[in-house]
Image (tube, rainbow, N blue to C red):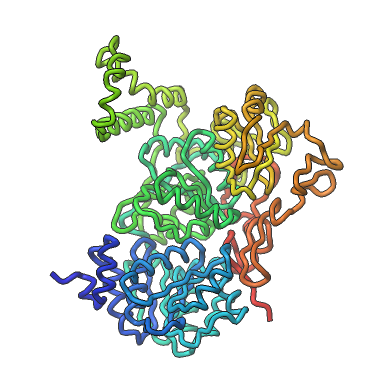
Amino acid sequence: MINPFSKLGISDDVVNAVKELGFENPTPIQEQSIPVLLEGSNDFVGLAQTGTGKTAAFGLPLLELIDFKSNKPQALILCPTRELCLQIANDIKNFSKNTQNAHVVAVYGGANIMQQLREIRNGVQIVVATPGRMLDIIGRKAIDFTNVKYVVLDEADEMLNMGFQEDINDILSTTPDDKKTWLFSATMPPEVRRIAKNYMENPVELTMGTKNTGNVNIEHEYYIVKARDKYAALKRIVDYNPDIFAVVFCKTKMDTQDVAEHLIKDGYNADALHGDLSQQQRDKVMQRFRDRNMQLLIATDVAARGIDVNNVTHVINYALPDEIESYTHRSGRTGRAGKTGVSICIINAKETGKIRQIERIIGKQFTKAELPTGFDVCEKQLFGLIHRVHNVEVNEEQIDKYMSRINDEFADLSKEDVIKKFASLEFNRFLEYYQNAPDLNLSADDRFERGERGDRRERGERGERGGRGAEAGYSRLFINVGSVDEFTRGDLLSFVCNNGKISGKAVGKIDLKGVFSFVEVESAVAETLLANFKDVQYNGREVRIEKSGEAPVGRGGERRSGGGYRGGNGGERRSGGYGGGERRGDRRGGERSGSGRRGERSGGGSEGGFRDFSGRSREERSAGSGRREGGERSRRRS
């Protein structure tokens, strides 16, 4: 029987590699685009949603068209983010593993540029790059594109949304005029249409479904709550879905980190992904998510681009995106490769108009859903536990040696008693939390409470703590580890709780710096934590933790540690890029994040908690299409 990919014109070596990856039949976009692209004589525009197999749609034809006897760059693939760059490069490497002398290099910011230059010098046929780092390498005259025959612009709408129009122009100007340009995008805004007009000649256009529409395998729901109840609503949705494996979208880096931090403190398996993380930290977070060692990934729009993780069950929009078209990209993280998924929006009453706008764009109706009651959540969790127990695989060989002791322990209990006690281990926790839980649903004719504003910081069920000093009942502790040790706030929370032998609920605000951090803990457990940390080490050095008020202070400020910060007359000093956000790379092509120019500024006061944005926030606004969120960006100077 002839393989379906062979029928499309793909060679046996590539087909065998694709089969080993588990692909049996081409997706609609692959089936329609591969025969056209294999001709190699046309410019091409492909419009299809994320998760429909666009990488293989252009990657497989490239492997058939490229001359692998030559070690010169013949194809350039541009994409907006590091994660997507790595994903595309890895996919093409997997497709070409049976192809002799095939070399693919990923070029992106935040990684060792010298290693990338070495790979290019050693010979490469396919270059996958983000615009900023690609411009840097071009500026170093380290690559020759005179033999490039094909340029692929993947996620073109997002590259323009991130302000890469000028960079794309500069990069394409270094490629031959007779090259063929293939453009792939989930949406077709006017800016993408202009790229097609400027760089293409009579392109073949292929649209899978209606332009800008959402994936048919995704259900769309929204919940209306008061702004202050948004975090409580998020937890209730998660608790009602025991097997949830989700991406939660926030608007800013600060909100992303805050939501993740509070979920971790409340016992959820979560972490944040945003532009202020180093490449190693981002890789670490993503690996945990891909391995399903993490249940909830809290992310910003740009950081989540390129996340190609199978079996994501839900996408939760904790805040709606500023650009309505971005909703299509968010929801596309679920329902991939033919699977079904659910996209959920948690909104306030003022945002129902945005839901109607999104419906018009994606061509699908939203369902107005009701948040489950506390009783509903407890019941769902209980039977979820019972279902897992019923279906668990028993290792008879390993468990047999313990059965006599287990039976002795349960000798005075009946079968019914054992079942009740076992079920109560998990059930009691939810029963206690949701006892007398309020109804969080906001009916359509309800009005916002007097004085409540759309941009007000929301407070979760447990309340928020913010400000410079520790809140009443909490002690502020100094600890000599920070982001330079590759800690995220979640990592630091686990480190403090595990070594200090305290509960995560006893931890308040975590202020992560470069070579040190501050942690607030309930005063009642502070002495216990300090005592347990007396002999703790990290990477071979002693970890010091002490009450920040007892530490030696600099002039008018807080304790100095390794030159990392000062107080009184200038706040934190930036040391090695830490304290005010990292700035990596050189003037061109480097990656900027944190509070650097063109980075997303996630400020807005010293109070803690979450923010509800009813419109585009001042912190994220920048001129023209130059909005950034931790992505790679460099400016070509004349």
Residue reaching furthest to the bottom = 178
Residue reaching furthest to the left = 1
| Nearest to the observer: residue 464 or residue 212 | 464
Q: Position of residue 516 (x, y in %)?
A: 69, 43
| Nearest to the observer: residue 548 or residue 480 | 480
Quadrant showing the C terminus: bottom right
Q: Position of residue 631 (x, y in %)?
A: 57, 63
Q: Is residue 489 above or below residue 411?
A: below
Q: Position of residue 379 (x, y in %)?
A: 34, 28
Quadrant showing the N terminus: bottom left
| Nearest to the observer: residue 15 or residue 233 | 15
Query: Which residue is pictured at 31% across the width and 69% down the height?
Result: 29
Query: Which residue is pictured at 67% across the width and 69% down the height?
Result: 586
Q: How many marks?
A: 0
Q: Is residue 148 left or right of residue 566?
A: left
Q: Is residue 97 above or below residue 472?
A: below
Q: Position of residue 251 (x, y in %)?
A: 55, 52
Q: Is residue 119 left or right of residue 362?
A: right
Query: Which residue is pictured at 78% across the width and 40% down the height?
Result: 559
Q: Is residue 331 left or right of residue 523?
A: left
Kindly indicate the quadrant of the structure image that contains residue 38: bottom left
Residue reaching furthest to the top = 412
Q: Is residue 486 left or right of residue 353?
A: right
